[in-house]
Amino acid sequence: MNIFFRELKAHRRSLILWSVAILFMIASAIGKYSAYAESGQSMNELLSQIPKSLKAVLGMGDFDLTKVSGFYGMFYLYIVLMAAIHASMLGANIISKEERDKTAEFLMVKPVSRSKIITAKLLASLFNIIVFNLVTLLLSIALLEKYSNGEDITGEIFLLMVAMFFLQLMFLTIGTGIAAVSKQPKATASVAMALLLVSFILSSAINMYRDLKFLKYITPFQYFEAEKLLNQGGIEPLFLFLSFGIIAVFVSVTYGFYKKRDLSV
Amino acid sequence: MNVIEMKNLSKYYGKSRGIIDVSFNVEEGEIFGFIGPNGAGKSTTIRTLLSLIYPTSGSATIFGMDCIKSAPEIAKEIGYLPSEVFYYDKMKVLDLLKYSASFYQKDCRKRIMELAEIMDLDLKKRIDDLSFGNKKKVGIVQCLLHEPKLIILDEPTSGLDPLMQQKFFELLLEENRKGATILLSSHVLSEVQRLCSRVAIIKEGKIIRLEKMSNLNEDSYKKFKLELKEAIDKGYFTLSGISNLEIKDKTISFLFKGNLNMILKKISNVDIFNLWIEEPSLEEIFMHYYEKEVERR
């Protein structure tokens, strides 16, 4: 438990900063929406001129941007990207920082097994991503309510946040997995980030070129798209299973490799 | 009883050598010295014992338990001071020490205060505001606060001023009197000479000698220095038993191990102006272990 609380304390500042970032993100989205809403239908007409592929890249899809739910659906892509960046950085750093900052020779000679250290760190990261998720949920509900014009979107926001939680879990465990395998503690965060960006770009490419659709199983960003979630009735079981699979694999990679390898001290 | 037992411990990093076939035991209650130049494999050996890294082959036990399988169990009774101390920069010294203590099922508060007092350590400062020497002090307190049965020190005195070194050594001797076993690695021979009862000498990953300190000290090495009235043939003193031979004009110095009568007869055959015979320091004894080839002039 002492490691768990230590990690919570160590990540407190960063969690606060991320929360502020979410606040700004959602607030600026709403600022833009109110401008759209005022201009009325003309904005939708203008937007319909934008080529479909560009819309796909921007995450606009087929949303009705005059409605706050549609607007939020478009913005969800960026919120999810932030959540994924947070989760994968957190996962990669929480494991590799002991080696990177050379505190491994302190922590790893204490009377705790490496597995227990991993467990404490995973739980602390889980706590962090849950807080991230709840902050996003509450801010979204609180800030969007004013513009909803009687449209009840709380249910939709809940659904989107549940989906986001799975994405966070996937990127968190991918991060810890990379850190557990890698013998270069300084490189793990960049590797995790590169992997994330590649899957994000791939996801955009899939949305642009329908021919690439068969690749949708390999990038988590395709699993829970707002458009599908909101317009096609919730989370697809297949992708839910895939998410659980990815999480399970990377959790076992994290434990398995970290126990067996030499620490870089 | 042996506290540490190593059997043919080898560690390779890929193809490069870490340590090769290291085997030695550390007995309960002794202060054991582990000497060798930088890069010889001292830290690798210690890190293997602490299962921070795993051996390529061979095995080691501490307190009779396998050092990999029972690492967490063993760690309860180990205090470790790494050669370079790094802690969580943003923590205060006291918080770090409390965090360290929280891993042991003991109340260490009193001991932390005592040790901080002895080492003159400011507990309120943040880790990243500390100088190198002060970080080392944190390391020392951190290493001793749970009163471990086995203390492992890797190059402990670097960064400490002589006064602190002295206090630290007194602390160690006190812990030793109370029953702690100590493994001390160093490349500074004089500190090993002062503290240790036995030593292992490591060079290029291999243990080249395992000896009681008293034997090493008495190891009939004598240091000779002579001043001659006139220069002699350079080959005159190249004979078995003589090492570290240095000839500077009319001044000759060397280490000698062997029959003293023989060397004295040899000296009496030349015309000498002055003569010193001294106990060599360990540094001088070990010079020829360290150097790959004794330089001859």
Image: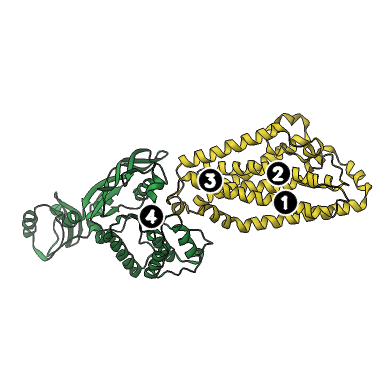
Marks 2/3 in contact by CB < 8 Å: the verdict is no
Q: Secondary structure at mark 1?
A: helix
Can I make out residue A19 in this image?
yes
Marks 4/1 in contact by CB < 8 Å: the verdict is no
Residue at point 84%, 38% (across, down): A52
Q: Nearer the viewer, residue A176 or B265?
A: A176
Residue type, numbered disc 1:
Thr
Q: Look at mark 3 in the image and give the residue it sits on.
A: A119
Residue at point 25%, 62% (across, down): B194
Q: Distance between the Cα atoms at labels 2 and 3?
A: 22 Å
Look at chain A in the picture and name its colour: yellow
Mark 1 or mark 2, earlier in chain: 1
Residue type, numbered disc 2:
Met
Q: Nearer the viewer, residue B216 or A62?
A: A62
Q: Distance between the Cα atoms at labels 4 and 3?
A: 24 Å
Residue type, numbered disc 4:
Tyr
Residue type, numbered disc 3:
Thr
Q: Distance between the Cα atoms at labels 4 and 2?
A: 44 Å
Q: Look at mark 4 in the image and give the residue it sits on.
A: B80
Q: Distance between the Cα atoms at labels 1 and 3?
A: 26 Å
Residue A261 on image: x %, y %: 46, 41
Q: Look at mark 2 in the image and give the residue it sits on.
A: A164
Left or right of B28, for residue A44 = right
Q: Secondary structure at mark 4?
A: strand
- Are there few (<14), some (14-19), or many (20+) residues within 10 Å of tag 1? many
Look at chain B in the picture and name its colour: green
Marks 4/3 in contact by CB < 8 Å: the verdict is no
- Find residue A136 and name its label: 1
